[in-house]
Amino acid sequence: MSSYGGVIISDQWLQSQFTQVELRSLISKFNSVKNQNGKVMAEDLPPLMVKLKAFRDMYSEEDIRGTLSGLGSNFSDEIDFESFLKAYLNLQGQTTAKLGGSKNSSSFLKATTTTLLHTISESEKASYVAHINSYLGDDPFLKQYLPLDPATNDLFNLAKDGVLLCKLINVAVPGTIDERAINTKRVLNPWERNENHTLCLNSAKAIGCTVVNIGTQDLIEGRPHLVLGLISQIIKIQLLADLNLKKTPQLVELVEDSNDVEELLSLPPEKVLLKWMNFHLQKAGYKKPVSNFSSDVKDGEAYAYLLNVLAPEYCNPATLDAKPNERAKLVLDHAERMNCKRYLSPKDILEGSSNLNLAFVAQIFHERNGLTTDSKKISFAEMMTDDVQTSREERCFRLWINSLGIATYVNNVFEDVRNGWILLEVLDKVSPGSVKWKQASKPPIKMPFRKVENCNQVVKIGKQLKFSLVNVAGNDIVQGNKKLILAFLWQLMRFNILQLLRNLRSHSQGKEMTDADILNWANNKVKSTGRTSRMESFKDKSLSNGIFFLELLSAVEPRVVNWNLVTKGESAEEKKLNATYIVSVARKLGCSIFLLPEDIMEVNQKMLLTLTASIMFWSLQQAVDDTERLPSPVDVSPATSINGEDESSSSLGGEISNLSIDDTASDTTVTSQFENEGSTASTPSTPVGDGIRAEEKGCIAVQ
């Protein structure tokens, strides 16, 4: 175990079966059923465990009672936490068996899952090691450790300091992390190592990774299944980055008319890749549609047809007539001649490894997509893309929504919110109990009026939360009014931030938090260090040089800013350097933020509000934690429970799920006509658990 604190179990094997997020969640649940004497009795476990998401709908209380009886439990006895964990693992093992055993591990995760036995795919590990060796082999710092040997644990050992993961994020989405903020000494102390992992996890979230049960402690310990799961998501984001109309307008060729473009816009990258593959297979005369990257490509036929139509000059006529094993080899030989990196082996094709097959097809797409250069179609696709500001705002809200851990994953805000369901999920998250689910319709929704009903409830709840929604109806959302959607989401995000701060600020005594409170706190914090910088408002043009925010970050944690790296912020280039550094330093500190450096340079007041609020949240949380129970100065972030729910009882960060209804200070007025352009939201952006997690340390601003 690392020297960092957390939930410590005397039985080391038992400790190794859980992440810190899971332990925090479970100990919170365990403590919640203590009686007046502070004891938990064995008879309290069945009603507790049946409510856990891992076992919900799988067992009744009687089933669990029977299992515990079989373990020799006397229901009149007191039970300790370790015994509870053992009972949990036993029941989890039965659940795995009941479901027919665990399937092949999936690394491209939307949420890291935990099973009794953590397994990793050696093929995937080898492919990701090859990817890292290829893309980071010339890195000035890492080249002394590369190439890695896939047959060893070098990957997991190197990941323990956090440098590799931060560098990999920058390969996937260049510029996400200011590398000046990465601690790159050969030997890092525990604090520096934790900073790197905090920076990594917040930055991973900022590029679109959604990882639930993973935190800095897990990365410091190099837990293979968690490290590999995070790496696979980062690589996936890199490989699928161009599968959208903005980056590749030629994709418009996949649809027959303009009415289908909206559908294409709403598809996740994996579905776009499948659509592209089927488009070419149909042209090649392949009769069977491919609906997945596993069973549908096992025999290699689809690959043979695809490669033959994309690169006929490398075609081997014997490929289709060969047996599956030989065909798989010929397919990879064909791909090799196209300069495609091999993400899979013939065995991976035959076994239907979905992650590696997806990576392989994505690589083919990058090398040769075979799409039209018809200028007329391309110009049409370019007209469909949003302006830069709107795109940045959409990305910001998409990342924020996905970071909340709701059940539905958002791929495109403007398309995905039109049925109202996702907005209801977000509202229920930030204002629990506000949604009347019996009156809501869950997708897929065929009847248009059901979508309107959902959106009408969204607007109704917004008005209850005191949002400014003048002349707005549910149908405006159904119709995809982008300005309205952005403005609504801005108010929702701002409500979330202010309420979270109010709940954390113990001396507020229920008083509403306002923008002015955040402004005054920031100015007073900087002033307390003897500096003279201040901001008059969140649209103060002097903020563009970034000096004030660097001084604020230094005020809440003196060691986090290296002033030797700070410029005067006089030229545009110097401002960009400072702004980029601010974003990375804030994430390194523990702020979960979604803004871009451009937001600081352009003094985007809404984004600067969220940045300041995030730093304030982190600072206030430290003060609260110092007076409570945290054993480590870095162990301070919101937990995501093992059953997928925010753990409000174990961490103040979890109070996101206990917010009260109120936002009297909303400064955004929304009308269906949007007569006042100044009323629209202006929220750009850039695109994991508890204990010592990225959000762990707690800030909840917009990244």
Image (cartoon, rainbow, N blue to C red):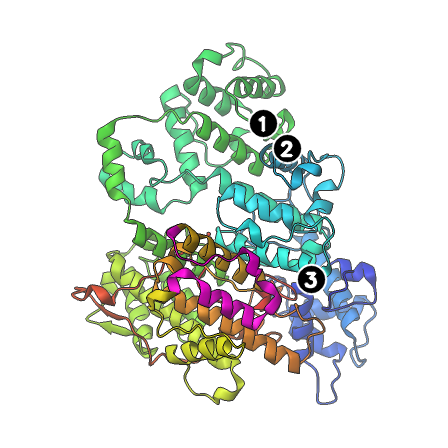
Location of residue 182 in the rendering, given as x and y in whole percent from the top left corner: 60, 52
Q: Which residue is mark 2?
A: 130
Give the residue type that dot 3 points to: Trp
Question: Which corner quadrant holds the N terminus?
Answer: bottom right
Looking at the image, residue 294 sits to the left or right of residue 22; the answer is left
Q: Which mark is residue 326?
A: none
Q: Is residue 515 visible?
A: yes
Q: Quadrant of residue 365?
A: top left
Q: Is the residue under label 2 in contact with that under label 1 (CB below 8 Å)?
A: yes
1 or 3: tag closer to the N-terminus: 3
Name the chief secondary structure element in magenta.
Answer: helix
Element under disc 2 = helix
Give the residue type that dot 1 points to: Arg
Report the residue at 46% width, 88% height from top.
Answer: 510
User: 586 above or below 669?
Assistant: above
Looking at the image, residue 490 sits to the left or right of residue 296; the answer is left
Q: Quadrant of residue 235?
A: top right
Q: CA distance from mark 2 to mark 3?
A: 30 Å
User: 438 above or below 660?
Assistant: above
Q: Which mark is residue 342?
A: 1
In this picture, which residue range is highlighted in magenta? 543-572
